[in-house]
Amino acid sequence: MAFTLTPVKHRIVYYERGVQAELMATLRGHSRSVVAVSFSPNNKLLASASRDGTVRLWLFPKAETQTVWELGHPTLTVAFSPDGELLATGGHGGVVGIYRVNEGKTAMRVELRDEVVQAVSFSPDGKLLAIGTGVWDEKERRLSTGSVKLWSLGGNELVAEWIGFDAPVNSVTFSPDGKFFAVGGWDGKVRVWRTEPDSPKYIVVAHTGWVRCVAFSPDGKLLATPGFSYQPMGSWWDTPIPIWRTEDGKMQILLRAGLLGFIRGHRGPVNSAVFSPNGKFIASGGNDKTVKIWHIEGRLLCSLEGHIGLVNSVAFSPDGQFLASADSDGSILLWCIIPDF
């Protein structure tokens, strides 16, 4: 499938010293919006999920398509298992597909009635798959509520379920040490559980609009919650990204623009954020068609511009040297990221 090594017109704006970035390639193959991207743990594959009903595996860093799964419905989420042997996907149609990466064959299917699968995440030990959904309301003809399910991969069975969320669930994830489990949704709230208890450890209102993504730092001590908050009329409309302390839910950092807009953060909703593997940087992507790289202390280091569509998802490679960003135009941009100290 097509890719270019001399990609689309782009611009990199630096604000502070910290990283150097270079656009390496543009991956084209999806015919509709690419909603999610994820690198394999061994750094050799990149998975992408699209509203065109396909999931693609790209050889990395060759940027060539290895496998295409035709799922027949818009696909919204994708995740590798910790050992890289399995790939989980989900979307419209209420089906979670779990595939064997090396064989390209289906290992397991989880069918959910009247639900849209919006997020999947493996537990660090690879034994559980967390599934976040939006529940379809036939009367109102929309996703009205949400649920979270924990599925045992060994027993192929449901082991826990939380239902009755006030809004669809957008994101689910385990902390790297497996001690915490976080959920974000359209109600603007983030719920964090310890792995064992039945009730949330705490709930924070991260945004007045919605939470689009939840992401733990590599050491599990911080939690990023990009999304959208409604702004007063006449404001600069910079959308901050809250970073919370995992242990107690206290806000630690707020990633936002400089004073008076001289350094601009994201304009409008922020759809994705991810910590670098060394925990020193955070990358984010949003509806303003840009990717931002921040220092963990809260400083905006640079803005990566080149997407035609809204940026839906960002992912660091396991070695931290590359960043993939996917957009609503169906393209994936691959950036080389070099620390600059």
Image: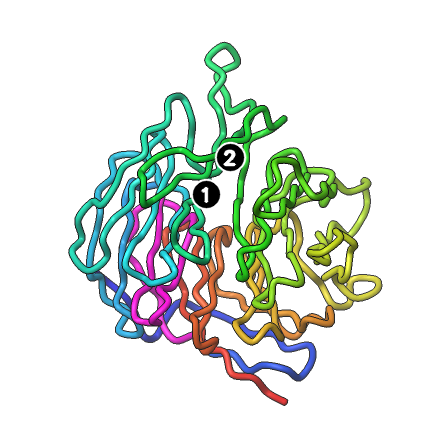
Within the image, what quadrant is residue 150 found in? Answer: top left
Q: Position of residue 60 (x, y in %)?
A: 30, 71
Residue in the image at 46% along x and 43% along y: 130
| Image position of 42 (left or right of 135) | left
Say which of 108 and 140 sits in front: 108
Specify the segment rendered in magenta: 23-50
Residue that numbered label 2 is attached to = 148
Say which of 124 and 233 sits in front: 124
Say which of 195 and 230 sits in front: 195
Q: How is the image coloured?
A: rainbow
Placement of 336 over or under 248, stated as above or below: below
| Image position of 298 (left or right of 124) | right
Residue 288 in sight: no
How far apart marks 1 and 2 lie (CA) works out to 7 Å
Residue in the image at 60% along x and 68% along y: 219
Q: Position of residue 116 (x, y in %)?
A: 42, 30
Placement of 227 over or under 326, stated as above or below: above
Q: Amino acid at mark 1?
A: Ala
Residue 5 in sight: yes
Q: Position of residue 241 (x, y in %)?
A: 69, 55
Residue that numbered label 1 is attached to = 130
- What's the magenta bit mostly, secondary-structure-wise? strand
